[in-house]
Image (tube, rainbow, N blue to C red):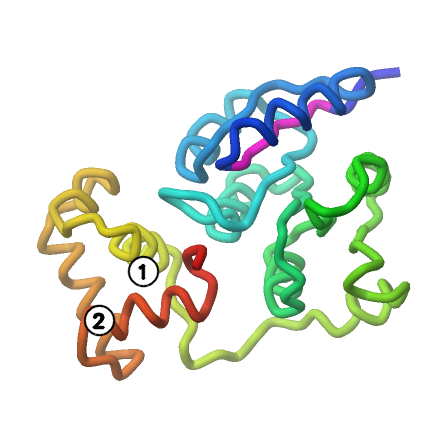
Amino acid sequence: MKRTRIILADDHVMLLEALKKILEPEFEVLGTFTDGRTLLEAAPDLNPDLIVLDIHMPLMNGLCAGQRLKRKMPRVKLIYMTMSLDVDLAAEAFRIGASGYVLKSSAAGELIRAIHDASLGRSYITPLMTKGMVGTFLQNVKPRKNPERLTLRQKEVLQLLAEGRSMKEVAFMLKVTPRTVAFHKYTMMEHLRLKTNAELIQFAMRTSIVAA
């Protein structure tokens, strides 16, 4: 039987190495990545069946990366493995097309089960969050009508600014001009009715666009 082809993405190298050792006997691990942008660039060429990724990663968070990956690779399965028990984050993960949501504090067997379920076209959510009500949770995952909703590009700009990078650095990393970065920054501030850089960064932290 053909083994499921997997990519792992997390900014903790030791965790990546541990996960690889756990999963390799049963699955084919194609590669590991420590930031969302590198994952996004490399994944299409590796052509995995499934990607296990964290939500909080540098350069591009897992939700942004996952949404873009689903656009590029509609058939790829996404399983988020995170420390967050935030129901809103879990709901957002499923809105963008995730097949699983597992806590890092769970046993390794739970991740393996999530991979098997995803491979069979099923969804998996850690029981620690749903208390067994997986079906009810999934039925209530609906597109969010949120006036604070940002575009993917705005989220990318905001994440990099929140990491302390200058507009010139952000422009270089996103391959755009500093003027374009400034446009996105001030458009966000106007849209969100924020007046200072500090308020913009606080918004990023509050909405989990970047890790606290």
> Does the segment drawn in magenta span residue 87?
no
Question: Of label 2 and label 1, which has the lower sequence position?
Answer: 1
Q: Quadrant of residue 190?
A: bottom left
Q: Position of residue 46 (x, y in %)?
A: 56, 21
Q: Amino acid at mark 2?
A: Thr
Query: The C terminus appears in which quarter of the rendering?
Result: bottom left
Q: Residue at x 45, y 55 (%)?
A: 211
Query: The N terminus appears in which quarter of the rendering?
Result: top right
Q: Position of residue 125 (x, y in %)?
A: 78, 55
**Nearer to the camera, 37 or 109:** 109
- Count of numbered marks: 2
- SS for dot 1: helix
Numbered label attached to residue 154: 1
The residue that mark 2 highlights is 187
Q: Residue at x 64, y 37 (%)?
A: 52
**Nearer to the camera, 86 or 67:** 86
| Mark 2 and mark 1 residues within 8 Å of each other at the beta carbon | yes
- The answer to whether 122 appears left or right of 93 in the picture is right
**Nearer to the camera, 65 or 25:** 25
Q: Quadrant of residue 22?
A: top right
Q: Amino acid at mark 1?
A: Gln
- The answer to whether 45 appears left or right of 52 in the picture is left
Q: Residue at x 70, y 70 (%)?
A: 141
Magenta stretch in the rendered image:
5-10
- The answer to whether 14 appears left or right of 132 in the picture is left
